Amino acid sequence: MKGAALSFLYAASSVGVIVGQSGSGSLSEVPYYGRSPPVYPSPIGNGSTSARWAIAYSHAHALVSQMTVEEMANVTRGWAGACAGNTGEVPRLGIPALCFSDAPDSVRGQEFVSAFPAGIHLAATFDKDLMYRYGRALGDEYHGKGINIALGPVAGPLGRVVRGGRNWEGLSNDPYLAGVGMGAVTRGIQDAGVIATPKHWLLNEQEFRRRWSSVGHAISANVDDRALHELYVFPFMDALREGAGSVMCSYQRANHSYACQNSKLLNGILKTELGFEGFVVSDWDGQMSGVASANAGMDLVMPNAGYWGANLTQAVRNGSVSDDRISDMATRILAAWYYLHQDKGFPPRAVYSNTQRHPVVDVRDDHATLIEKIGAAGTVLVKNVNNTLPFKKPRFLCVYGYGATLSASPWQNPARYGGGYEVNFRWNTLNGTLITGGGSGGSSPPYVVSPFQALQERVTKDKGILRWDFWSANPAATPYVNADACLVFINAYASESFDRVSLTDEFSDQLVLNVAGMCANTIVVVHSTGIRVVDAWISHPNVTAVLFAGLPGQESGHSLVSVLYGVVNPSGRLPYTVAKKESDYGESVLNSTVSFDQFPDQDFSEGLYIDYRAFDRNKTIEPRFEFGFGLSYTTFAYSTFKASLVNDEKLGEFPDGKVAVVQGGHPDLWETVAVVTCTVANTGKVHGTEVVQLYVGIPPPARGEERDTPVRQLRGIERVGPLAPGQEDDQVIFRLTRRDLSVWDVVAQQWRLRRGEYMLWIGASSRDLRLDGSLVIT
Ligand SMILES: *[C@@H]1O[C@H](CO)[C@@H](O)[C@H](O)[C@H]1NC(C)=O
Ligand SMILES: *[C@@H]1O[C@H](CO)[C@@H](O)[C@H](O)[C@H]1NC(C)=O
Ligand SMILES: *[C@@H]1O[C@H](CO)[C@@H](O)[C@H](O)[C@H]1NC(C)=O
Ligand SMILES: *[C@@H]1O[C@H](CO)[C@@H](O)[C@H](O)[C@H]1NC(C)=O
Ligand SMILES: *[C@@H]1O[C@H](CO)[C@@H](O)[C@H](O)[C@H]1NC(C)=O
Ligand SMILES: *[C@@H]1O[C@H](CO)[C@@H](O)[C@H](O)[C@H]1NC(C)=O
Ligand SMILES: *[C@@H]1O[C@H](CO)[C@@H](O)[C@H](O)[C@H]1NC(C)=O
Ligand SMILES: *[C@@H]1O[C@H](CO)[C@@H](O)[C@H](O)[C@H]1NC(C)=O
Ligand SMILES: *[C@@H]1O[C@H](CO)[C@@H](O)[C@H](O)[C@H]1NC(C)=O
Ligand SMILES: *[C@@H]1O[C@H](CO)[C@@H](O)[C@H](O)[C@H]1NC(C)=O
């Protein structure tokens, strides 16, 4: 075990053992800053939060009451086996080994499975229904393979660090958009009968030194309580609310206490405040102590015994871990199993090593159709001069760039992860079209339809011609004067285990400039794991159209071509802000924190102000493309703004104190307190779908005081249409919940619905605001 040598330091870390440096600047003077308050004992799950959990717990209790301590210690640990994670079985009681598998966008490493778009691409659709269907289809594939537990969806990292290596696995750095996706995908996966594992709980915002290594301890994410709740906890609430049966704790430290033994995060926020009834599983080899992790609320160690197994049995015998605690650990695991009805005829396990001949279990159904649809819906058009797109029957196209075709092998992605001291590798691009990122969040595509393949299919049908040059840095030696358009394909790669070192790369920027220098109608397609700055060429007069094509999964080319040719009118929106230059994001969140101290710190001193929240505060820095931005081939008019409070009698400052918490938080938080409506009309010449966004400005703490909250925050998304030219939808409805309008009150330790005037804006992006109004809560 990698952590063994230093683990004693942390045997009681959550009880306020302070090691290393405290946070920087004035924050370090705040009492408890940089230390995690102790929260013990670990809450015992009892199923009280819903009828369905109650039934699951009654079965689990009946089973656990027959188990010996050894048997409990067996189901709470991992064993080597066919799956990425396998719990211990208890043959005596018919308890099977439970199977865990990556990843959030594919059943990773198996044959005859689909490669879905990555989380960031799904978020760019801004479409709740597609998010649910994604989760359901993915869940059906896990189920078909006999896998009990899917390791996703992801909201940690949220995306605080602009160059973070794993931001693409999750949905968006906006907690509301991420939360909508976390809820919908969790519901989808679990409707398929598979346990979802929202991860990584919590604050795993960078890859550099995310884990203990020979250099020293993992980075400590030090975050104030308000930003913790309003940004980082927020999207997990949605997943819990939808019944998530499992949560994965993360590698790094939070306020100096390792996340998998952080009693504040596990016992406190997750199991008390959010009423979590399921089990907490460690990230792989993320356990850093035995007794401390058990008592802090971790329930299952993966992928082996870690510090538990026989030692956990002994710790129970000598009283260091209570009988109640180990029973609770086993009960939570089995309750999740019953909650998903996996005791009733789960499909046989069909997880294999592909180096050995094995039966074919094809679980793909017609998910390719959904994948293509999401691929197109998440494609974002950001520039389209003089209606260059959609194509109007071009006869002659030129295709340039490494991103148009397949890499030598899709399995040569540099997927580097594992332990140790992790450096920033200098990989900026993948030499081949990019459909997902690297590491454990990657996919196992059955095939990949490259952009070039799909263009060939279309051009063949149209009896046109193509010329291509994928590999030259300067294809200017071959100007085809008769071409209707030139397409240039570039990408931006990222992976688990290292952070990006740039949001651009010289080779690709120069390639675009070279093509634009010879071709008056140059269309740039960027496949990216997240933010990619484009100012090297975005204003070039010959760059007529630009698409952020995301990480679209196996049907990549089909999705793209349908947008290029107008079969699908683009409605994707950026789930992040694209700055003009990298430094515009602010030094503190651009790079991961690089430190070679033994106890490195990462202070989240920007608080709530990441991405558009920071740009909106700074009135001097204009983004290149703001959060929520994306063009269409048609135009939309917005009208008839209406807003009203509902449930007037339930507008107290705090949730009703007499009502118990359910999984996901206090039930009042999810109640609708206001309704906002508008009308959207298609005023252009073609069919189109519009992503309508609602932003809220929360009033200051008290009348006359300064605002202490971002100018505006996303609190509603509705994907409207498709609408025919001239058609309107006068029923665009946003339901604002108590949580949507609340702030986290650090003194009351509750969500607080402030008194005062709430500003409301409806728009097509975070800056293209078309309607506004307000609501007053007194
Ligand atoms: C971290 O410390 C801050 C400042 O004291 C505190 O507000 C917050 O609740 C702590 N969070 C955790 C997870 O320990
Ligand atoms: C169940 O657990 C919750 C949270 O710990 C607690 O508030 C409640 O009293 C418990 N109910 C029973 C019946 O034990
Ligand atoms: C523990 O689990 C392993 C692996 O599934 C199994 O071989 C063993 O029999 C189990 N032990 C007990 C005590 O049930
Ligand atoms: C238990 O503890 C001993 C001694 O601390 C250690 O050698 C062993 O690897 C631990 N793990 C298990 C599963 O027994
Ligand atoms: C109890 O057992 C655990 C696991 O072997 C060990 O780490 C701990 O030190 C023991 N505690 C006491 C008081 O003996
Ligand atoms: C766009 O159209 C205008 C007006 O017709 C023309 O002046 C301009 O050159 C066109 N731009 C491009 C890039 O074709
Ligand atoms: C990319 O791959 C192609 C084809 O496999 C190869 O010819 C080219 O040299 C590679 N480029 C780089 C920069 O590795
Ligand atoms: C961010 O990273 C880049 C590239 O590694 C480096 O040049 C720059 O100095 C870093 N900036 C900060 C503030 O650390
Ligand atoms: C745009 O493309 C034309 C070729 O059609 C070329 O002559 C011209 O120099 C290009 N413009 C720029 C600014 O590179
Ligand atoms: C805006 O950003 C600029 C450049 O980073 C900085 O100099 C300025 O102080 C910022 N202004 C505000 C109000 O944050």
Image (cartoon, rainbow, N blue to C red):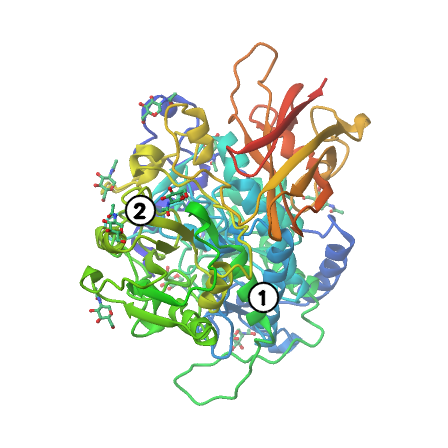
Foreground pick, 238 / 598: 238
Foreground pick, 599 / 764: 764
Q: Residues within 10 Å of mark 2 (few under 14, many from 20)?
A: many
Q: CA distance from mark 1 to mark 2?
A: 30 Å
* 736 versus 153 height, above or below: above
- Give x and y (percent) for residue 501: 26, 48
Q: Are dots 1 and 2 in contact, CB under 8 Å?
A: no
In this picture, residue 579 sits left or right of residue 506:
right
- Give x and y (percent) for residue 453: 40, 73
- Identify residue for label 2: 503
Give amino acid for label 2: Leu
Mark carried by residue 370: 1
Foreground pick, 491 / 240: 491
Indicate if the residue with disc 2 has its beta carbon within 8 Å of ligand 8. Answer: no
* 585 versus 421 height, above or below: above
Give amino acid for label 1: Leu
SS state under label 2: loop
Mark carried by residue 696: none
Q: Is residue 385 visible?
A: yes
SS state under label 1: helix
Quadrant placement of the C terminus: top right
- Give x and y (percent) for residue 531: 38, 46
In this picture, residue 652 sits left or right of residue 551:
right
- Give x and y (percent) for residue 192: 66, 67
Q: Residues within 10 Å of mark 1 (few under 14, many from 20)?
A: some
x 64%, y 67%: residue: 67
In this picture, residue 48 sits left or right of residue 629:
right
Q: Identify the mark nearer the N-term, 1 or 2.
A: 1
